[in-house]
Image: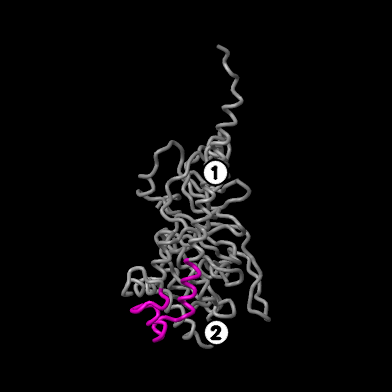
Amino acid sequence: MNFIEQYGWNESWQEKVTAPGTPGRVTLEHKNLYRVITENGEWLSSLSGKYRHEHSHQEFPSVGDWVMVEQMPGEEKGIIHSILPRSSQFSRKAAGDTSEIQTIAVNVDYVFLVMSLNHDFNIRRLERYLIASWDSGANPVIVLTKKDQCTDIEPYLREVESVAFGVPVYAVSNVTGEGIDELQQILSDAKTGALLGSSGVGKSSLINALSGSQLMAVQEIREDDSKGRHTTTHRELVLLPTGGLLIDTPGMREFQLGDYSEGVESSFSDVEALADACRFRDCSHGNEPGCAIQEALATGELQRDRYQSYLKLKRELAHMERKSDLAAQKAERDKWKQITKEYRKRPVKKR
């Protein structure tokens, strides 16, 4: 295996190459500069002026992207001219009152959804992560950390399994090493994973445990609320001794959904199946006769908290769709205003 193949390069990526240059993978981004691994070593690279002019910021490279780079003569630096089509993309709506989508991780085979077995455990947050995971094109894996601090993990496992149908779940300890071997087996043969979770769940410690070295700085958790302070401030792709790769990401204090209607259907397949079983196709799941949702709520087959979470997420998606439509309409209006403005500036030809 040559140098670039260690970072996941293979025939499938080679087939996507349509532009000249040297292929490389982005391992770090910092203020519009990118650290890119190529077959000729590591180059600190920047975007070409043409690419920057023709693409929006949302289309700029992210950690994990494969790019085509031109080496600057005599320097270990490069210029990025294009990005290869992505195999997967995990994203969220940017924080605040905006419809902008923020890319978190790209070209990953596995999304490791990390929660700790303490006060950080939040099943509703996990539902959101699962929705985005199913929509990303990557395979979700749930990792429950700090097992050594939990006296009884069974209630946590039952709660996770009630919302994560068919998703593998691993309880691990970065201190004792329990469960680490299983994760290392997943990340082999240049497979790429991304660690996602809130601050203080032990993502950086998990990378250190998987690598067998102190690759990432870590901080102790607070004793009063079992939360750790935020450690990771950037995204970085690291090569593990087992032959896999991991992208560590900053902790997410909030996770707002983008356009993930398909992800909702996958993550809430139990609720969707019940809705399809209603007597009437246009059932509002209120007081209609033969409503399978209401019957499942009454018998306990469907937990009310889960159904309320489903409704809340559906409302968020509908709101995002309306905002996206309004943003698109405004962009179209602004475009035609600019065209009209430029037209009026033209000199009038005299007859």
Residue 342 placement (x, y as % from top left)? 58, 29
- In the rendered image, residue 306 lying in the magenta stretch gets the answer yes
Residue 145 placement (x, y as % from top left)? 53, 76
The residue drawn where x is 61% and y is 25% is 345
According to the picture, the residue beneath numbered tag 1 turns out to be 331
Q: Amino acid at mark 2?
A: Cys
Q: How is the image coloured?
A: one colour
Residue reaching furthest to the top: 351
Residue 351 placement (x, y as % from top left)? 55, 11
25 and 157: which is toward the camera: 157
Element on which disc 1 rests: helix
24 and 108: which is toward the camera: 108
- In the rendered image, residue 328 lying in the magenta stretch gets the answer no
Circle 1 packing at 10 Å, graded few (<14), some (14-19), many (20+), is few
CB of mark 1 within 8 Å of CB of mark 2?
no
Question: In terms of secondary structure, what is the magenta stretch mainly?
Answer: helix
- Cα separation, mark 1 vs mark 2, equals 52 Å
Horizontal side of residue 255 vs 66, given as left or right? right
Res. 150 mark: 2
The residue drawn where x is 52% and y is 46% is 329
The residue drawn where x is 35% and y is 75% is 274
Q: Is residue 75 above or below residue 41?
A: above
Please identify the quarter of the rendering in which residue 224 is found. bottom right
Q: Is residue 135 above or below residue 80?
A: below
Res. 128 mark: none
Dot 1 or dot 2: first in sequence order is 2
The residue drawn where x is 47% and y is 66% is 314
210 and 220: which is toward the camera: 220
Q: Is residue 184 above or below residue 31?
A: below
Highlighted range, magenta: 285-314
Count of numbered circles on the image:
2
Q: Amino acid at mark 1?
A: Ala
